[in-house]
Amino acid sequence: MADARASGGDRPLYSNGYKAAVLGLLLATYTFNFIDRTIIATIGQAIKVDLKLTDTQLGLLGGLYFALLYTLLGIPIARLAERWNRVTIISVSLVIWSGFTALCGAAANFGQLALYRFGVGVGEAGCSPPSHSLISDYYEPKKRASALSIYSFGIPLGTMFGAVAGGWLAQEFSWRVAFVIVGLPGLLLALIVKLVVKEPPRGHSEIVERPLEAEDVVVEPAPKPAFSMANEFAELWAVTKILFGKWPVLHMVLGVTIASFGSYGSGAFVPPYFVRTYGLGLAQVGLIVGLIGGFSAGVGTLVGGFLTDWAGKKNVKWYALTPAIGLIVATPIYIAAYLQTSWQTTALILLVPGIFHYTYLAPTFGVVQNSVEPRRRATATALLFFFLNLIALGGGPVFTGWLIDHLAQFNFNHPGSSGLLHALGGSFSDPGAQSFSASCPGGLAPKGSAPELAKACAGAMARSTQQGIIVSLCFYAWAGVHYGLAAIGLAKHMRESAGTK
C-alpha cells in the first residue's frame, strides 16, 4: 500500500478544499455522463415520430444498445485503472462519449442511431470505475458514502439538465440539434479534469484522516502489480467472491440491480407519458421531468449518503435498512402519481417518492468500496456495474417498451378493458387481430386519417404507457426486500472487511 505522508508527520497529502474541488469535477463529469445517457428519454417521442420507431426500439436505444459495450468494456477498463492513471482514463472516456453523443444528431435511421449509441456506451464505460476508486482514495471510510452520494448526485443533475435542455432544444430546433448541443461541452470538461485533478497514491485515505499541510510532501508510490492473464482472472475472481459470495453484499447488489431495472425501465417512458397522456410539448415536459428529478432524486441521493454515514456510526445495518425502507415506502406513492387524471397532480405527487427511492445508491456504493482492498476498488465498481447495467440499463427500458407495445396492441383492440391485470393477461392471450403498429405507425394515426382512428391510437398509446410504467415501478418493492435481507450479517461482514485491509 502506498505511504503518502507530509514530511512533518503523518498528515494527509491533500487539503479539504482541494478534495472538494476534485469531487466537484468528478460530479460534473458524472452529470454529463447522465445527460448524454438519458437525454434520449426526453426527446425519444420526437425520435419515435420522426423515424417511425416502436417503443421496443426506443427501449433498445436507451437501454441495451448503450449498455452492452458499456458493461462489457467496464471490466477491462477498470483493470487498466488499477495500474494506470485514472484521471487520464476519465478524460479520454469523456471525449469519446461526448463526441458520439454529438454524432447521434447526424443519424438518418434507426441503425445509425443504434451504432452511435454503442459508441456513447464505449466512452461512458471509463467513467465510474476509476471515479469511485479516486473518491475512495481521497476520502476515508467514515466519509466515503457521503462523498459517493455527492458524486452520485450527478444522476439527478444529469437527468434534470438533460430533460430541461433536451426538451427545449428538441421543441425549438430539433432532436438532432439537442444531441449536438449537449454533447460538445464534454470536450472542454475533459481538458479541465486532466489539468486539475491529481492522481492520488493508492490507499491514501486508509492511512491518514487529518487535514493537510501541503508543503514538503514526499510520496512513496506503491509498485504497480505485474500484468498477467492469470493474475487478472485471479483479481476478478477475488472481487466476484465478495460481491456474490458474501450474503450482505450479494443482497445489496441484487437490491441496486432490481431497483435500477425498475428505475431505468419506467424513467425511459416518463417524458413520453406526459406527452401521450396530457398532450404537453417537449419543452414543458422536459421542465417538469427535470425539476422533479433534480429535486426529489437529488435530495434522496444526498440523504442516502449522509444519513447512512451518520446512522451507520451507531449501527452498520442502516446502510441496508435505509434503502430498504425508502424503496418500499416510495413504491405506492409512485403508483398513486400515475393514477391521477391531471398532469399537475401527477407532477406534485412525484416530488415526494424520489426522496425515499434514491436513498439506495450511496449506501450500496459505500458498502462495496469498503468491502474490498484499495487496489481492487475500480474492479469492484466495474463488476457491480457490469451486473447492474447489463440487467437494469440493458433490460429495463427494453422490458418496459416491449410491454407497452404489447399493451398497446391489446388496448387498441379492446378500448373498454377494465384494468391493468385484465390488460396484462389479454395482451398475451387475446391481443386482437388489428395491428396497432400498422394502424398507428410511430404511435400516431397517419395524416389524413379519420378522427376515430386518431383518437383510438392516442388513447391506446396513453393508457399502455401508464400501465407499462406502473408495472416497472413494482420492482422497487422487490428491491426493498433484498436490502432488508442485506442487513442480516452486515455488521459482521464490515468488521471482517476492515480487518483484512
Image (spheres, rainbow, N blue to C red):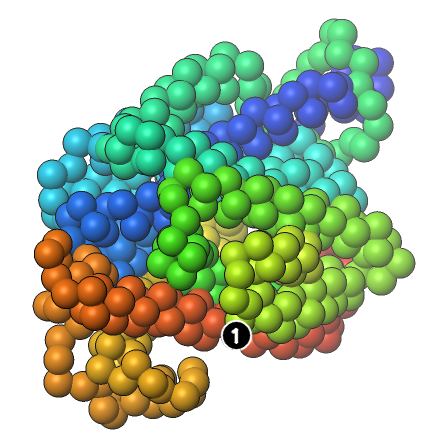
Number of on-image labels: 1
Label 1 sits on residue: 474
Q: Horizontally, is 410 left or right of 359 in the view?
A: left
Q: Where is residue 250? Give x, y as percent.
A: 57, 69
Mark 1 residue element: loop
| Residue 67 seen from this side | no
- Residue drawn at (33%, 55%), measured in percent from left and top? 63
Q: Horizontally, is 455 left or right of 198 in the view?
A: left
* Residue 350, placed above or below residue 114: below
Return the residue found at the far right: 314
Q: Where is residue 283? Give x, y as percent.
A: 42, 38
Q: Where is residue 414? Give x, y as percent.
A: 27, 84
- Residue drawn at (34%, 90%), measured in percent from left and top? 425
Callout 1 amino acid: Cys
- Where residue 330 sits, quadrant-wise, is bottom right
- Residue drawn at (33%, 30%), measured in percent from left and top? 172
Which is more toward the observer, 439 or 206? 439
Q: Horizontally, is 410 left or right of 248 in the view?
A: left
| Residue 328 seen from this side | yes
- Where residue 233 sits, quadrant-wise, is bottom left
Return the residue found at the far bottom: 429
Which is more toward the observer, 369 or 48? 48
